[in-house]
Amino acid sequence: MQSRRKLRFRLILSFALFGFGLSALFALASLDIRTRVEDQLITTSLQEEVDHLNQQVVDHPDRAPSFNIVKAYSWSDRTIYKAPLSWQTLDTGVHDIYEPGPDGRLHHYKLAVRRKDGVINFIQYDVSRDELGKQQLIISVVGAVFLFGLLSLALGLWLSRKVLKPVTELARRLRDFRKNGKAEPLAPHFADDEVGELALALDEYANRLTAMVERDREFNSDVSHELRTPLAVIASTTELLQGSPDLTDKLRERLKRIERASRQATELIEALLLLSRAERRGPTRGETTEVAKVASDVIESQRPQMRDKPLTIDLVERGTVSVNAPASVLSVALTNLIGNAIKYTLEGSVRVEVGDNKIEVIDTGPGIKPEDAERLFQRGVRGEGAGGSGAGLGLAIVRRLCELYGWDVSMRPRSDANGAIASIVFR
């Protein structure tokens, strides 16, 4: 999962961690080198001192050597038993000895041993004093590491503000654009660098997208406007033909079907045109529509789709429900929902219930899978077993219209029997 931290925070954190880590590695390396060099120098010095002591004792046995920072001891093979027990078996060389001191604490000292010509010499060097200095050095180094870490953090804050200033400005302008919905050119506000190239690319993309959306809206508006004229001619001609006295009942019924289809096409065009305009300026509220009346008209217009199927369709009104929207919008939505229920139900019933500030279309068809309920509202998606030449756009249009007016549209399988329930909840 990608991090959701801001870019500046990540830059500051990376810079601080880099500075702190580099300082810590340098401090550890310095302490290790210091320890190794110091140990090597002490060992070499003690070895040289004990060799020199051995030579002095052999050459001048009656003269006692003097040392300031080390203690020297000399015994012979016959008197070695006087030496501390832990020293008596040590070979020539430098040894690390850990023994409790008079204060009860463990003391660390180095002991240089030289056996030559029957003389055994010891030089003792107390390392505890150096260890105290080493502890002080460690404290100083740790303090320096934290100091450099804070300096790296401060430097990261300053550099991030300078380096990310163009990016921050670009992000701010994009936020303002998203908030206000008004696009302004970005490139003039930035230098000719990578951020400027990004701003220029965003400007070009926004211009292409805006032009494409405008062309699409203008096309929808032009098509909707141009289709009104032939539909009006069809409606008026049908009305005149219905007034002829010599019409048979069969022809009169067919003329009514033509009239209903013309009215449905007009309502669909009005809804699409309203949708195109409202998406730019917001939905027009002020026209009140009674849901049950529109549902009744839609049911009557859809009865011819039942043909000879053993199917009944009923309207159940459990209360008065009115919505603040044009009747054409609600008619288009219900035509798709009721028409789908009739199409997929081979036998049984389709029941339309109005009440509790919602409308439900309940059928006894094959039903739907719960996981497919939301997918059916996507463009180009059709239900299983769908026949005909439909493009799978009906429910997608219903979803757009409902979102425009703040309604909740959904589909779900029936729990008590086969079939599906399509519902619109008005808010």
Image (cartoon, helix red, strand yellow):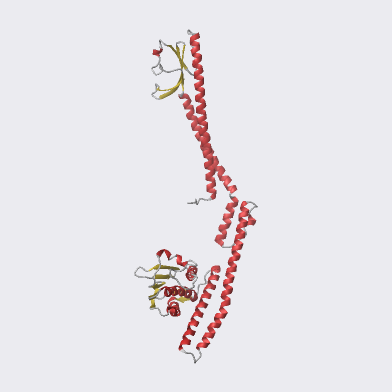
In the image, is residue 280 above or below residue 123? below
Residue at the top extreme of this rendering? 62
Left or right for 416, reference 22: left
Identify the residue at image location x=59%, y=74%.
222
Rendering quarter of residue 153: top right
Residue at the left extreme of this rendering? 416
Identify the residue at image location x=59%, y=54%.
170
Residue 318 shows in this picture: no
In the image, is residue 23 above or below residue 159? above
In the image, is residue 136 above or below residue 349? above
Residue 359 percent location from the top left of the image: 41, 72
Residue 71 percent location from the top left of the image: 46, 17
Residue 287 or residue 421, whichever sits in front: 421
Q: The C terminus appears in which quarter of the rendering?
A: bottom left
Left or right for 41, reference 345: right
Residue at the bottom extreme of this rendering? 246
Identify the residue at image location x=57%, y=74%.
223
Residue 262 percent location from the top left of the image: 51, 80
Residue 190 percent location from the top left of the image: 63, 54
Residue 36 shows in this picture: yes
Left or right for 264, reference 161: left
Identify the residue at image location x=47%, y=29%.
135
> How many badges with numbers are in the image?
0
